[in-house]
């Protein structure tokens, strides 16, 4: 869903500079969880199929696939927060206007 309100240039630059790091960190966490699945108990086939199912779910998450688009900046940040790829603290440095919009729509304080 495109965000029809224009974003500030400073917000756009900050988003682009942080996105790759957020995604890398998110995927590192996923890899740790996958290792837990693989090293868990049960038959190898059960672990394999559990991992495959989990990867199929995770590959659609914002922390994995989101691309930087100016038109979807606010909705991208909201999705990243909703899926746990970032926290409200990760929004430090973004404009007060953008943060207020996100916090009011996500009910974050």
Image (tube, rainbow, N blue to C red):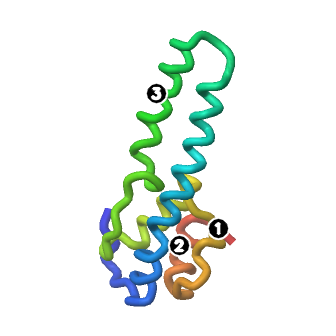
Q: Are marks 1 and 2 in contact (CB under 8 Å)?
A: yes
Rendered residue at 46%/27% (across/down): 53
Quarter of the rendering occupied by the C terminus: bottom right
Q: CB under 8 Å between callouts 3 and 2?
A: no
Residue 76, given in percent of the width and then of the height, sits at 42, 65
Mark 2 Cα-neighbour bin, 10 Å: few <14, some 14–19, many ≥20 = some
For residue 75, the mark is none
Left or right: where 95 falls relative to 109: left
Dot 1 lies on which element? Answer: loop
37 lies above or below 9: above
In this picture, is 103 found above or below 32? below
Residue drawn 38% across the image and 58% down it: 66
Q: CA distance from mark 3 to mark 2?
A: 31 Å
Q: Which residue is mark 1?
A: 108
> Image point 56% across, 42% down: which residue?
31
Q: Quadrant of residue 84?
A: bottom right
Residue 6, horizontal then vertical, whole percent? 33, 84
Percent position of residue 59, x then y = 41, 43
The mark that comes first in sequence, 3 or 2, is 3
Residue position marked by numbered label 3 in the rendering = 53
Q: Which residue is mark 2?
A: 102
Q: Which callout, 3 or 1, points to the residue nearer the camera?
A: 3
Query: Residue drawn 45% across and 37% down?
Result: 57
């Amino acid at each position: 869903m495109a965000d029809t309100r224009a974003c500030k240039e400073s917000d756009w630059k900050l988003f682009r500079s942080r996105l790759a790091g957020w995604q890398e960190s998110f995927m590192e966490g996923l890899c740790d969880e996958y290792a837990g699945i693989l090293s868990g108990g049960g038959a190898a086939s059960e672990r394999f199929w559990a991992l495959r199912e989990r990867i199929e779910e995770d590959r659609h998450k914002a922390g994995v696939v989101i691309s930087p688009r100016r038109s979807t900046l606010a909705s991208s940040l909201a999705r990243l927060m909703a899926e746990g790829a970032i926290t409200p603290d990760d929004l430090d440095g973004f404009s007060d206007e953008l943060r207020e919009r996100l916090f009011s729509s996500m009910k974050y304080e």
